[in-house]
Image (cartoon, rainbow, N blue to C red):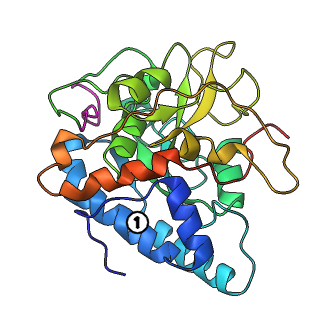
């Protein structure tokens, strides 16, 4: 399957179903995500780091495992992005700050590890405000993320790259964090769905803190159903309720209209029920 950044992207739920049915491969999903990033992210600045070769290797491994009957669950082969405060073993984690430009963690955050264990494929690290606080600034090592509905507008923050990347269809799923609105704000500003989980349900281990007594880790996706996918499990993880979803109203972001007139068909996925996935709950 040839990646086409002008075609309608799949939600996390639709991608999971297509993988399970054999209609698409993890390699195709990853190549599609990378093609969209190359085509659109120069205007959006949602990614501060893209790990293309690592993602391609993981996608090939996911396809081999699925063919051998060793699928890990519904997230196996689904691309995702991480706000750049989640530590990732061997992959730079900067918190969007010059102070951490050389910071390469030795181990994954718990959320990154659980997503990796579920077979989800990390495509890259996403922009934030410096140390997840303040606002957009131009004296940082990376430019601020822009809203795909109108790149002159703010994304909300501090999960700015997560909101922009999901809204633009660069990845079907991203992890943000919320201390005082940092999942809910970008979800609302960018027209996607986000969960602020109940405090303590999702582990904050390995996530660069802003305020330990207030920080929450949670998912962001196109739809309520897709955003809830990481909170479900078929085995060895308990089912977890992770909060109230934001309203999921979607039409085509302005940045994409000239190249993707058919995106409206993606609305159909919003009415479908969520696929199960690996719980991010503390264990």
Residue under label 1, please give it.
Answer: 52
- Magenta: predominant secondary structure element? loop
Q: Is residue 144 magenta?
A: yes
Q: Residue 42's x, y, as percent? A: 19, 49
Task: Report if residue 172 is visible in the image.
Answer: no
Please state which of residues 148 and 20 is positioned toward the viewer in this rendering.
20
Q: In percent of the image, x 35 and y 22: which residue is there?
A: 156
**Which span is picked out in magenta?**
138-148
Q: In percent of the image, x 26 and y 22: which residue is there?
A: 137
Q: In percent of the image, x 43 and y 29: which residue is there?
A: 187
- Relative vertical location of residue 222 with respect to residue 207 in this rendering, above or below: below
- Relative vertical location of residue 73 with respect to residue 185 in this rendering, above or below: below
The answer to whether residue 116 is left or right of residue 132 is: right
Please state which of residues 211 and 15 is positioned toward the viewer in this rendering.
15
Disc 1 crowd, CA 10 A, few/some/many (<14, 14-19, 20+): some
Please state which of residues 104 and 95 is positioned toward the viewer in this rendering.
95
Q: In percent of the image, x 72 and y 20: which residue is there?
A: 199
The answer to whether residue 237 is left or right of residue 250 is: right
Q: Is residue 169 magenta?
A: no
Please state which of residues 23 and 212 is positioned toward the viewer in this rendering.
23
């Amino acid at each position: 399957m040839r990646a086409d950044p002008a075609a309608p992207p799949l939600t996390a739920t639709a991608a999971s179903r297509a993988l399970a049915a054999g209609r698409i491969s993890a390699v195709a999903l990853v190549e599609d995500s990378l093609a969209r990033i190359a085509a659109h992210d120069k205007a959006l600045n949602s990614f501060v780091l893209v790990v293309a070769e690592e993602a391609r290797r993981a996608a090939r491994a996911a396809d081999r495992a699925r063919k051998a009957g060793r699928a890990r669950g519904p997230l196996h082969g689904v691309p995702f992005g991480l706000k750049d405060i989640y530590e990732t073993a061997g992959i730079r984690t900067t918190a969007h700050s010059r102070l951490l430009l050389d910071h390469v963690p030795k181990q994954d955050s718990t959320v990154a590890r659980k997503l990796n264990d579920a077979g989800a494929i990390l495509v890259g690290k996403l922009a934030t405000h410096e140390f997840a606080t303040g606002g957009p600034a131009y004296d940082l090592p990376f430019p601020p993320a822009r809203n795909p509905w109108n790149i002159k507008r703010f994304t909300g923050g501090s999960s700015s790259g997560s909101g922009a990347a999901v809204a633009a269809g660069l990845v079907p799923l991203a992890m943000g964090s919320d201390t005082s609105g940092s999942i809910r704000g970008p979800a609302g500003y960018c027209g996607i769905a986000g969960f602020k989980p109940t405090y303590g349900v999702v582990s904050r281990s390995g996530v660069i803190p802003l305020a330990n007594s207030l920080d929450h880790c949670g998912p962001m996706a196109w739809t309520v159903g897709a955003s809830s996918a990481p909170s479900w499990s078929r085995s060895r993880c308990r089912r977890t309720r992770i909060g109230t979803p934001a309203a999921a109203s979607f039409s085509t972001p302005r940045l994409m209209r000239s190249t993707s007139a058919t995106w409206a068909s993606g609305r159909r996925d919003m009415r479908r029920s969520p696929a199960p996935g690996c719980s991010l709950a503390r264990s």
